[in-house]
Amino acid sequence: MELKVSTRSHAGQALVAIAGEIDLYTAPRLQSEFTRLLQDGPSRVVIDMSQVDFCDSTGMNVLLSALKRVRERGGQLEVAAPRPAVRKILQVTGLDSVFTVHEEVPEELLISEGS
C-alpha cells in the first residue's frame, strides 16, 4: 500500500497529514519527509493520523526519532486523530504517555491552512 504524506507549515507550526500504512516498506519515505521538515525547525509538529490504517513498530520508531529531534530543539511533536488500530498500538507500547495525543487535529492548525 502506498503512503501519502503532506505537510503544511505556518508560523513555526507544521501539520503533517499521513494516509495509508506505515510499515517496514513505507517508513523510509516518512523518515525522509521528517528529515526535510525538521531542517526548517518548526517548534510544533502535529501529525494527523486520521487516515493511517496501520502502523507497525518500524513506523513507531520513525515517530519516536522525529519526537527526539524536535525535543532536542525545545519543540514538541504531537499525534492527532489516531484510528482505533493505531491508538491501540500507542496504548500497548506505552507511547500514548510519551506523545501528546489529541482526539482531533487542533483547530488552530486547521485555521492556519488558509483554505
Image (tube, rainbow, N blue to C red):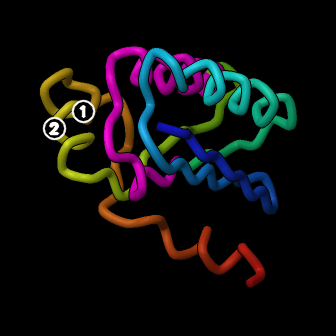
Contact check, label 1 and label 2, Cβ < 8 Å:
yes
Q: Nearer the viewer, residue 52 or 75?
A: 52
* Image point (61%, 30%), residue name: 30
Element type where label 1 sits in the image = helix
Q: Is residue 72 left or right of residue 48?
A: right
Residue 27 on image: x %, y %: 54, 22
* Image point (56%, 38%), residue name: 76
Q: Which residue does the numbered mark 1 point to in the structure image? A: 90
For the record, the magenta segment spans: 47-71
> How many residues crowd mark 2 within 10 Å: few (<14), some (14–19), many (20+)?
some
Residue 2 on image: x %, y %: 54, 39
Q: Nearer the viewer, residue 2 or 81?
A: 2
Q: Which residue does the numbered mark 2 point to in the structure image? A: 88
Element type where label 2 sits in the image = helix
Name the amino acid type tagged 1. Answer: Leu
Distance in Å between CA atoms under marks 1 and 2: 5 Å
